[in-house]
Amino acid sequence: GAGVSQSPRYKVAKRGQDVALRCDPISGHVSLFWYQQALGQGPEFLTYFQNEAQLDKSGLPSDRFFAERPEGSVSTLKIQRTQQEDSAVYLCASSPRLAASYEQYFGPGTRLTVT
Amino acid sequence: AQSVSQHNHHVILSEAASLELGCNYSYGGTVNLFWYVQYPGQHLQLLLKYFSGDPLVKGIKGFEAEFIKSKFSFNLRKPSVQWSDTAEYFCAVHNAGNMLTFGGGTRLMVKP
C-alpha cells in the first residue's frame, strides 16, 4: 500500500512569505505527527493530531507555525512570514495507534529553504 | 527535559567490520526505545524497537540492540556490516506524552 506522502518535496521561499506543507498519511492512521529536522540534527517534535484533534502543539516554535487536519486525514503545516531559521526538512509521520509510543511511519519530508 | 545522545556523529567502517552505535537517554522512568534508519534518498524507517521483556532486541537486516536500564543506554550493534548499511541512524525515545525524542543521528559509511 502507499506510504506517507508529502508535498512539495522542495520549497524555496523568500523571507516573509507564507508557505503551506501538505501531508497525506497512510489511510486509516489515526495519529499524525509533524517534526522539524534542521541540517545535521535529529527530528524535533512540532505537533500531534489524533484524528482531527490537535492534542499537542507544544513543539511549535512560534505563533507563525500553524497546523491543521480538518477531516482527520490530510494535514497541512503552515508557516507565516517565513524566517531564515525556518529552513529545515519538515517530516510528517503517521501511526495506526493512539499514542506516540508505537512505531511511526515517516514520509519523505519537505525541504524548506528560506532565502 | 528528556534528551537523547548519540556520541558518534560519523563512523566509517570497512565491509565485514563489526558495528556498535551508542545511544544514551536522560529519562529515568519507563521508556520505549527505537532505532530508525535513513538510507540515502529514502525516508526514515524503523530498524527495531524495545517496549518490554528481553532487553536484547533483534531487528531487520541483522541489527540488534541491547537495553541496559542501569546505564540508560540502547546501543545498536551488527556483527558484520555491508556496503548497503551506509545510512544515517537515529535513536529515539518515548517516555510520556505525544512525542518521540530523537538523538542527533550517526552517519555510517561502509567502504566496500
Image (cartoon, coloured by chain):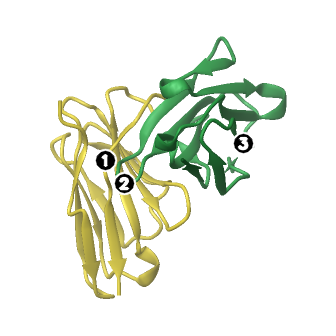
Chain colours: A yellow, B green
Tell me the residue at 69%/49% (across/down). Answer: B6
Residue tagged 2? A91
| SS class, disc 1 | loop
Tell me the residue at 66%/53% (across/down). Answer: B11
- The reply to whether the C-beta atoms of the residues labelled 2 and 1 are less than 8 Å apart is yes
Q: Earlier in the sequence, mark 2 or mark 1?
A: 2
Q: Quadrant of residue B63?
A: top right
The subunit carrying tag 1 is A
The x and y percentages for residue B66 are 70, 25
Are discs 2 and 1 both within one chain? yes
Residue tagged 3? B22
Horizontally, residue B57 falls left or right of residue A65, namely right
The subunit carrying tag 3 is B
Horizontally, residue B34 falls left or right of residue A9, namely right
Question: How far is mark 3 from mark 2, CA to CA?
Answer: 24 Å
Q: Residue furthest right?
A: B70
Q: Quadrant of residue A26?
A: top left
Q: Residues within 10 Å of mark 1 (few under 14, many from 20)?
A: many
Rendered position, A104 above or below B66? below
Residue tagged 1? A107
